[in-house]
Image (cartoon, helix red, strand yellow):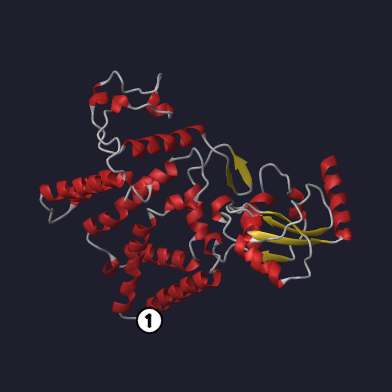
Amino acid sequence: MPLSKLTWIVAFGIFPVLWLVAKNRPKGTQLLVVMLLALYTLNMSYLFDGSFKLLKDYSFISQSLRGESDNRFVNSLLGNISVPFPAEFVQGFDTQKRDFEKGLESYLFGKYSDRGWWYYYPVVLALKEPLGTLGLLFLAVGLTFGRTAYRLPWRDEFFVLFPFAVLFGVICTQTGFSIHPRYLLPALPFLYLFIARTGKAFQQPGKTMKFAVTSCLIFLVGSSLHAWPYSMSFMNEAIPLQKRPELLLGSNIDWGQDAYFLNDFLKKHPEIEKIRIEYPCPEGIERIGIPTAGTPPTEPESGWFALGVNDIYAASGRFAWFKKASPVDFVGYSIYVYHITPAEAERLQHETSNHGKH
């Protein structure tokens, strides 16, 4: 699992705890085989490059691992331990640790910070999970505490909630930066397993709970289908489209995925003869056949413009004047298209100059 997400390194601690708690505990040799198989798979994926290297032989870049020199373990007993991971995997962990230590520019609720927030991921969960899913979560919590029929033996509850708590806790405590919602992904399957108890409603008498669960499921599926194919930018229906950038940015909305849709949009609108574009397409705007007349201006001008939402709300404020203009269309949920008339450009220039004076 650490191959798919580095956060899953905690699984090597979670599995032994779950083994200890299990009612019909498997033999210790079975746990040992599982752990060794996981280590073998991880090392094999790196062709055992640098596997079992002594801890003291590494050169680290994160402060917590390098100490006063480049390795705080050089003169300690721990330094003689053979690290059971590939060298590149260890260095990747070290690099990630360094990034969290130094901090990166983060954004939440319309404000930039040079570090992140512990509550960032709970907010992301509340905003990016469909309302149907959140409804099922509230039902699951209420039914667990309110009705015996929906409770599981405490060990079964532990097997679901403990991994979620550990993974979610580890994610929230890494406050060096708060940028990508994908860090939440390892914890979500356990949350969904907890929610799954609401399915018991269909085995219980009465129609109220069946109706509530069915409504949430229909709303959940409907939300997903409505957002497709712009699923990466999804935020739930409680958040109006143009309010979303005031709450979250970065890969919560855009990672260059809507460039091809912009190409399709321009082909459908031949009246747009010249358009100036600012959008971070990984392949390059021109390479995928999008004609551009250059980048948008940093001060109000007339013309056609297309900008990624991350560029409009960037910390630099380079294109901040577009916040005062109204888009005429949207490409996906991440590109705003503007047609600024000469009269509107004059109005925006006046507003911008007055704002600068104050």
Asked whether the viewer can see residue 336, the reply is: yes
Along the horizontal axis of the image, is 205 left or right of 250? left
Q: What residue is shown at x 26% (from left), y 54% (from top)?
A: 158
Instruction: Please state the horizontal and vertical placement of residue 219, each as a whole percent of the image.
Output: 49, 73
Instruction: Please state the horizontal and vertical placement of residue 357, each as a whole percent of the image.
Output: 85, 40
Q: Examine the image and state in which quarter residue 307 appears.
A: bottom right
Q: Which residue is mark 1?
A: 207
Asked whether the viewer can see residue 17, the reply is: no
Which of 281 and 114 lies nearest the eye of the viewer? 281
Q: What residue is shown at x 69% (from left), y 51% (from top)?
A: 312
- Please determine whether, in this image, residue 5 is positioned above or below residue 217: above
Which of 284 and 299 lies nearest the eye of the viewer? 284
Instruction: Please state the horizontal and vertical placement of residue 350, each as a whole percent of the image.
Output: 88, 50
Type of the residue with mark 1: Lys
Task: Assign the C terminus to one quadrant of the image.
Answer: top right
Which of 19 and 200 lies nearest the eye of the viewer? 19
Q: Examine the image and state in which quarter residue 316 appears.
A: top right
**What is the number of callouts on the image?**
1
